[in-house]
Image: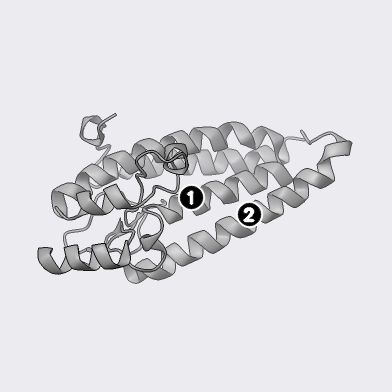
Amino acid sequence: MNGRGLPALGPRGEGWVALQTILFVAIVGCGYVGVYWPSPAESYLAVLGIIAAVGGAVLLLLGALTLGRGFTPLPRPHPRSRLRQHGIYRLARHPVYGGVLLLALGWSLAEAPLGLIPTGLLWALFELKSRREEAWLVERYPEYAAYRERTRQSTSLASYSGANEPSGIVRSCSAPGMTTISTSAPAAARQASTLGSTGVHESASP
């Protein structure tokens, strides 16, 4: 689905953030309903969950540090935001979204079997949110289209199958969002071809 055909849900996409917040609460709440994994698998899944959560925390931290003060969960770029293509964004367009999903998966595997349901819904939401976000990014940063073509999307299964790899925006997170540093178009093109960067859009602080 083309991101331009998706609803904005607010001037800067506030509705998308509200939906993901509801799912966050549901994922955490599933750990307190008294439903657990069967004993034979519980220890094994707990270890897998911890590994996934640690990986997610690292990915989320790297994305947030790269964005700095520009980090925001809102998908629409701030008027003074910059597009970032260095650091973790050289490898993935939406590392913050990917990190959040791994954290949710880790929690579900370790403590909350029912949490897999809202985690799946969160993945679907991030897929749609990232498309809406990238449509805005292309409007604001024409060079983002080339960045999107060369950088994988950390939340998309297609990006790991050799298909077009979509996802490297300064993220909201979600997150899921991220940006690449804006330079002149020729300079950005040279930097992109040299670094193979990944950029996500995160709006700069006002």
Q: Quadrant of the N terminus?
A: top left
Q: Are marks 1 and 2 in contact (CB under 8 Å)?
A: no
> Based on the displayed image, in which of its 4 quarters is residue 206 positioned?
bottom left
Residue 107: image location, x then y, percent = 66, 47
Q: Tell me if I can see residue 11 in this picture.
A: no
79 shown above or below 10: below
Residue 88: image location, x then y, percent = 42, 64
Name the residue located 53 percent from the left edge and 44 percent from the top edge: 24
| Element carrying mark 1 | helix
77 or 30: nearer the eye?
77
Give the residue at mark 2.
53
Name the residue located 76 percent from the left edge and 51 percent from the top edge: 47
Residue 58: image location, x then y, percent = 55, 63
Query: Is 112 left or right of 185, judged from the image as shown?
Result: right
The total number of labels drawn is: 2
205 shown above or below 105: below
> Based on the displayed image, in which of its 4 quarters is residue 130 positioned?
top left
Give the residue at mark 1.
98
What residue occupies the far right of the structure in this picture?
40
Binning the other alpha carbons within 10 Å of mark 1 as few (below 14), some (14 to 19) or many (20 upward) gives many
Query: Is 50 left or right of 170, judged from the image as shown?
Result: right
Binning the other alpha carbons within 10 Å of mark 2 as few (below 14), some (14 to 19) or many (20 upward) gives many
Disc sitting over residue 189 in the figure: none
